[in-house]
Amino acid sequence: MYFVKNANFKCIQLSTITVFIHFKLRGNTLQLRYYELRDVTLKLQLQTLRGRIVLLLPVACRYSRKHAKMPEPKPFERLPENVKPKSYNITLQPNLVKCVFHGSEEVELEIKEATKHIRFNSVDLTLRDIKVTLSSGEVLIPVSTEIVAATEMVTLTFQETLPIGTAKLSLAFDGELNDKMKGMYRSKYTSESGEDRYSAVTQFEATDARRCFPCWDEPALKACFNMTLVVPHDRVPLSNMPEVSRSPCESDPNLQVVKFAPSPLMSTYLVAVVVGEYDFVEDMSADGIKVRVYTPVGKKEQGKFALEVATKVLPYYKEYFNIAYPLPKMDLIAIADFSVGAMENWGLVTYRETCLLVDPHNTSASQRQWIALVVGHELAHQWFGNLVTMEWWTHLWLNEGYATFVEFLCVDHLFPEYDIWTQFVTNTYIRALELDCLKNSHPIEVPVGHPSEVDEIFDDISYSKGASVIRMLHSYLGDKDFRSGMNIYLTRHQYGNTYTEDLWAALSEASSKPVAEVMSTWTKQTGFPMISVTSHQDGDNRVLTLTQQRFLADGSVGDNSQWMVPISISTEKNPSKSINEVLLDGKSTQVVLESVSADSWVKLNPGTIGYYRTQYSQEMMAQLIPAIATKCLPPLDRLGVFDDLFSMVQAGHTKTVEILKLLQAFEDETDYTVWSAVHNCVARLNQLISHTDFHSSFASFVRKLFSKIGQKLGWEAKPGEKHLDTLLRSLVLGQLGLYGDEEVVAEAKKRLAAHVASTNTLPADLRSPVYKTVVSQADEKTYDQMLKLYREADLHEEKDRISRSLGATRDPNLIQRVLQFAMSAEVRNQDTVFVIISVAMTAPGRSAAWAFFKKHHQELVDRYEGGYLVTRLIKYITENFATEEMAAEVEAFFRDHQIPGTERTVQQSLETIRLNSAWLQRDQDDIKKYLLEL
């Protein structure tokens, strides 16, 4: 789809646009698949054309200047539907010394329309020996092979017309085991003898299978895969399916040919291959699935925790979905170089080492919890994403939002002591709201075309907002109907592809509720509502007036968007129970609460399940604040009230001083998740106030806020201590150290010295706060001591802890050393961006990290070829500035140095910088006055 934009005009008249939209016929129902165009007035003409609908759209688009800054979508078209793959026979031979690979494949094709052209995807591959064998036995050689790098497509043209029917495409290809962590790439490790070696690893999501073998690289073009690997005898070969045979390689006695069982119908992005040296631990799940966890050689004990989780997760999901896991085995493998956290390849899930391996002596409680969540997430995909797959990347959230929700379900089942649903609110729900209140957010369902656009939607909208609205839907439907609907959906569409509407249809069928009508308001439009609530008394009854409008971070009045909002209400009489539920399906409504007195508090959204912000009247907020201090409100509601008020502060609806006053109500708080919400607020305020001359007063305020809970927890774990107490100690001591509490700083230095001297090893849960505290005060000697620890560490988790602590330094010379270290060969490419980000999180490091990025941006882009890591780096090194001058500088830089796939992130950062600037100008004087008078 093309958009014509001109930043010089606020209103632009566009010529006719032709948009192709797929449709399905189900009985007598025509199901349209459409994209939302915001601020666009449309007049539509419809006509059918070969199973599609052509919409001729004369449109008048009203764009503000801010909208006009958004980049133009790149020209893109999907593969034609006249030729489709049915099965692939692929042979791959990676050379782990020269870091290249050779391959060949035969693709069984279904030719649905007579044609002289075959088009498929390929990039960074050299193709040769191309031919097509028709069902008659006739062999055709293409007269031309056109390779277009920009579209990553290959078009074969034949002299003769290929008739309708089946055919076989045969070809050979060569490629590089690259160092970009995409396609088929090399991952470096050190052997037991100390030699540097490489594994061959694949990472295909979203559109990188085409870097490993020519293919129809779209999720809807499913096929069966027959994989053969030609590998050295002393290497472990793995793929999605179990190995079925091994035989000597006729051309090289040092190699063996390993064949794997045929796969079920699956998408190309889920195909996986690993060749390297690994140990493993294995077990059988209760439902009879062989589970293995592959680890680096000599570290198989570190795979036991993930194995325990995986063998319990599979039967749990089988029971929850009422569908058995469809493959005969499940492998989980730790990869030394891996760009993301994990990848759900069917039957062979790949992980960063830090997301899979647990060292009983050196892994923190928070990391163990994280590993449980990641394993739960990836195994949920085996059903939701692999068995049933989204039709196109527009519906990515069907994969990621649902898997994010379900990972919490399964971890709550396996580890109830984690209190994981409470943590969901701070780690997932609030994160989504913070991004989604920007004007440059995007709908859950976002149109995606060119491959470079796909990586940008692997963000907190697809994952965290997706999970949050599913959690809200789960509550609205109830668990029984929700599970029944999931079973209908998975059973009906297994081995197929779906649109969001297919999920809504199944859930509606199970629940008899208007799921599609309700949920389309959450998936097809950007943002979320703010529910403003006022009350008055009518005799013994309290009458609430609820009004919705879009919540925007700049406090402006949103557009006319409306949502169908399931709203629940609790009162002081029974804080943990919802006494009234209503579906707000219009602008405003009234709710009568019987027998609720005027002096009793009333709270919307108990459990913080509804995906919206609540703005209480002054009187209602005044009644809720004492309930926070006395803990009459449950933890999720304490943090919900607090976080809603903080969002009002950021938007300018309330003064920042009000949140500073409320923070003092938490001095006696004991709940970890509530303190996490407090920490998020304090960190946000810290970034803002670090631009002022009164930051020391704010630091004093924070030290006092955390001092009481710090004294209560102390440094030593207590007998019978809960998991969340361990997490809380790490959080609190980290905050006290960061803000310069003298006792904590002194103790941290003392404990690090003992740790370095090996006289008293630091518990894993205290290492990150101790490292950051000490580094924040470090001189050259201390810094070199930390580097020595880094170099001696064998566990990747420990290397991460140390390297990400280095950015806490405030010394300008050490800041430069950290930045240079981040780009050195000592830091794996997957970790470089996080070290640079750690520098950008401090006031002294912010400008240094930005200057460093500007100088090295091309090297970084070349290193990663765009993608998730570059996008994340840009976000964190830019969004904490707080002046219009810096916004203009960032804007100018990315205008002159465009990086494909980062356009939306840049716009979000620019918006955030300008929001910071407005916030600081609005409240700076009041904040200073309040802090100085304390």
Image: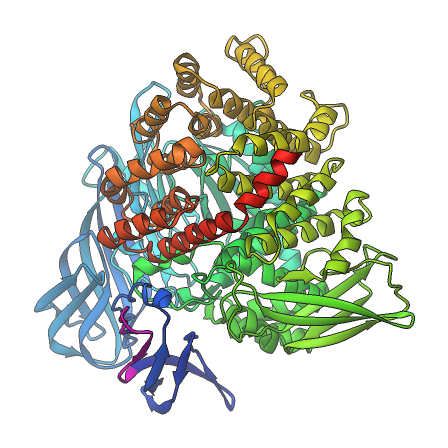
Our reading of the magenta stretch's main secondary structure is loop
531 lies left or right of 297 = right
Q: State the residue in front, 772 or 530.
A: 530
Which residue is at a point 69% across and 36% down the rendered structure image?
Answer: 724
The quadrant holding residue 446 is bottom left
Q: State the residue in front, 266 or 812.
A: 812
191 lies left or right of 351 = left
Magenta residue span: 4-17
Which residue is at a point 29% across and 73% down the rendered structure image?
Answer: 9
Q: Position of residue 462 (x, y in %)?
A: 48, 59
Figure check: 567 above or below 682: below
- Can the viewer see residue 289 in this picture? yes
Q: How many marks?
A: 0
Q: Position of residue 427 (x, y in %)?
A: 58, 47
The quadrant holding residue 503 is bottom right
238 lies left or right of 81 = right
Q: Position of residue 563 (x, y in %)?
A: 59, 73
32 lies left or right of 747 = left
The quarter of the picture where the N terminus appears is: bottom left
Q: State the residue in front, 86 or 654.
A: 654
- Can the viewer see residue 448 in this picture? no
Q: Position of residue 61 (x, y in %)?
A: 35, 78
Report the coloring of the rendering: rainbow
Q: State the residue in front, 108 or 345.
A: 345
* Residue 7 magenta: yes
Which residue is at a point 34% across and 46% down the rendered structure image?
Answer: 870
